[in-house]
Amino acid sequence: MSGKTIVSVTGHQDYAQGSIYAIARSYFELQKKLSNERLRCLLISPKKPNVCPDFIEWLECKPFSYLEYNYFIIYVLHQFIQTDFVLIVQNDGFVLNGKNWQDAFLDYDYIGAPLNTLFRYQDEHLIQAGQEFWERHFNNIPPAHFEVQNGGFSLRSKRLLTLPSELQLQWLVDSAKLSCNLPLELSPRTAMHNEDIYFCAVYRKLFEELGIKFAPSALAMAFAIESTLYHAKHQFEIDTIFGTHTMGHFVLNDLNNVYMQKAIEMVDDNILSNRLAQVILLNGISITTPNTLMSNHHEKN
């Protein structure tokens, strides 16, 4: 099972083309350090995107929701992985600079972009501490609290992926809340259903007892960035980061271009004032900014 798999899974066809770009960019960037490695590339989506290079395998799936995406990653993904490790990418999560790859990433069963929040799982309840709590404790995390590393751009061992099915570990979804606005929308009251929280918080203690290793924050910061505050608090140099998960703010619409899909915090409409944008531009990726988002941001200020 030597080698690595770069995979993207989506039940939304609108995300499929961007996922192809995430796979392809990550593949080409990894060639800078892992040119002799066997890198398998796989997309699972409802339809094959218009642009799909021959080196990327495609498997058809029925359309499914984000809730089902988490279910798929937890219980099904391992069935399609024949390598020791898998790099999960998305249209908003991809390799920035392959030269920043570290073999130390492979010393762990799970590594992703660290989040500036803490979770505690107790008596089948997930409790999320606020950002202020994290800022007071990020250098000395209290017992029974866990930092979560985002799964949207993450590296995992095949061993970890097989455990939920092998051990028949229950996937827990909290009760739902209904939005007050139209159209009506249901959403779980907590993030317990998210697959990265499932691995990093809900069953973290059990996995560690079984010998599963989660990357320490110092290495996770080198692996990927999502919360720029996290890296800033640790005074981490942004030019050494391997990849990113942008939380839907920037999505790939080509190998070397992202589209600003969601508004970001800026000063005087200057995109260079945003730290995540700085990281993206630093790595040779251009940013397309829609006028509507820029206008909306200007009006808010």
Image (cartoon, rainbow, N blue to C red):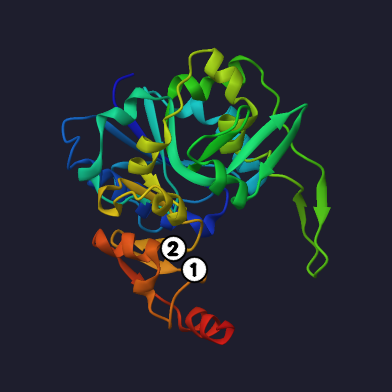
Q: Is residue 102 left or right of residue 226?
A: left
Give the x, y percent position of residue 76.
56, 29
Q: Is residue 294 left or right of residue 273?
A: right
Q: Secondary structure at mark 2?
A: strand
Label 1 sits on residue:
261
Q: Which mark is residue 226?
A: none
Q: Label 1 sits on what residue type?
A: Gln
**Quarter that holds the N terminus:** top left
Give the x, y percent position of residue 168.
66, 18
Q: Secondary structure at mark 1?
A: loop
Q: Taking 156 as reference, is 24 above or below it?
A: below
For the residues bearing labels 1 and 2, Cβ distance under 8 angstroms: yes
Of 206 and 72, the residue lying toward us: 206
Residue beneath the point at 38% across and 43% down = 221
Give the x, y percent position of residue 161.
51, 25
Label 2 sits on residue:
250
Give the x, y percent position of residue 296.
55, 82
Residue beneath the point at 48% across and 63% down = 249
Mark 2 surroundings: few (<14), some (14-19) or many (≥20) residues within 10 A: many
Residue beneath the point at 45% across and 79% down = 290
